[in-house]
Amino acid sequence: MKNVLAVLLATQAPFGRNEIEVVSAGRRLATELGGTLAVAVLGPADDRWAQEPFSFGAERVFRCEHEALGTYQNDLFTAAVQQAHAAAQPDVVLLPSSAYGLEIAPLLGYKIGASVLLDCVQLTGDGTSGRVSIVKPVYGGKANWVLVAKKAPVVLVMRSRAVEPLEPQAENAGETVRLELQLDTRVARSRLVERRVEEEAGARLEDARIVVSGGRGIGGRENFVQLEHLAQALGGSVGASRAACDLGWVPASWQIGQTGKKVAPDLYLAVGISGASQHMVGCSGAKHIVAINKDPKAPIFRVAELGVVDDYRAIVPALIEALKQRKRVQQEPGALG
Ligand code: FAD
């Protein structure tokens, strides 16, 4: 195996961490294999956005634009990727672990006769044998599988926050290829009937530098307001365990863990969360984990750098007050902070 194709969906948002991680993983793998990295950009993209992959080491960008690709639809977008695959002839196709990546990967794998692997956290290429080794966590992160792909093509979905992004090199350039896509809209087996945009308070969870996360121990929907105040005082965002989401206390999009979002903040503050392995999968990339839990035997204390054994209702309001007090002191003229 030699050549790599990373697949990205063009968005109105800036070229962000998810895109950079997939291109960075592709660049490293292509270099180890002694091959090339191409990137397929799906849908209408701003020219500057579509140039970004070059600064992270792509040699070619395939622009996949067509009037049928105005709104995401999995059959049509998969057909576009299939045509990008035919043009680029890669051995390895990489997708991000986003809603579209998870949908397109199996469809594409079926169409091009590839092996498909989801939730990959590390890729290594052997330039001599052409083999690609893939690390994939199993049993809720308690163990890793190391798999060797012997036969091309393979389609791999990268777990978010698992890949260290490369530094952009603004001077890098490459070739842009505008694909003449042949898309038959009759292949679309679904259509978008309504779009609801969920309001997000603070930074996107995946991008937040501080995450305050609540679990079943919070005890109810209304109590999450306290965590929102704490997150606000810290300049962070609020997340939750699956238990809190399943109980309907907070939206499912707040869920962190194996079947939720993966976050890698500087500080992860787990409040009333036991620390089940399926939850920790989603926050193990955090630089510092701090836990508040009234049970000294809670598993979260095995991974937390700092822990408070107490009822959160005694700790969280005091923390908010201390942060407010600190802010007031900092704002006073001549304060040392
Ligand atoms: P609990 O385990 O019930 O823990 C609540 C904690 O709060 C306890 O430790 C308790 O001591 C503490 N507490 C109670 N009251 C207070 C108080 N007043 N003050 C302070 N502490 C208090 N879970 C996820 O989170 N994310 C996932 O993505 C996920 N995916 C899963 C996938 C699979 C296939 C499976 C089987 C499970 C998955 N789970 C996931 C569920 C996971 O196994 C746990 O059940 C879940 O994480 C528990 O949530 P919790 O810690 O909030 O609740």
Image (spheres, helix red, strand yellow):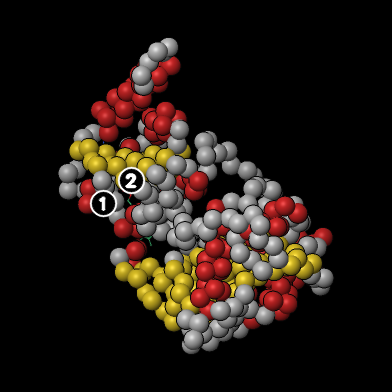
- Location of the C terminus by quadrant is top left
- Left or right, 16 with reference to 267: right
**Disc 1: CA contacts within 10 A as few (<14), some (14-19) or many (>=20):** some
Q: Is 152 or 225 nearer to us in this picture?
A: 152
Is 245 above or below relative to 333? below
First-in-chain label (1 vs 2): 2
| Circle 2 residue | 288
Q: Is 47 or 118 nearer to us in this picture?
A: 47
The reply to whether residue 249 is in sight is no
Residue 136: assigned label: none
Give the alpha-carbon distance from disc 1 to disc 2, as whole Å: 10 Å
Q: What amino acid is labelled 2 in the image?
A: His
Query: Residue at horizontal 37%, vertical 15%?
Result: 335
Secondary structure beneath disc 1? helix
Secondary structure beneath disc 2? strand
Query: Residue at horizontal 74%, vertical 67%?
Result: 175
| Circle 1 residue | 303
- Left or right, 302 with reference to 268: left
The reply to whether residue 209 is in sight is yes
Q: What amino acid is labelled 1 in the image?
A: Val
- Location of the N terminus by quadrant is bottom right
Coordinates of residue 99 in the picture (x, y in percent): 57, 59
**Disc 2: CA contacts within 10 A as few (<14), some (14-19) or many (>=20):** some
Coordinates of residue 176 in the picture (x, y in percent): 75, 65
Query: Residue at horizontal 36%, vertical 54%?
Result: 284
| Mark 1 vs 2: CB contact within 8 A | no
Query: Residue at horizontal 49%, vertical 69%?
Result: 118
Coordinates of residue 57 in the picture (x, y in percent): 61, 64
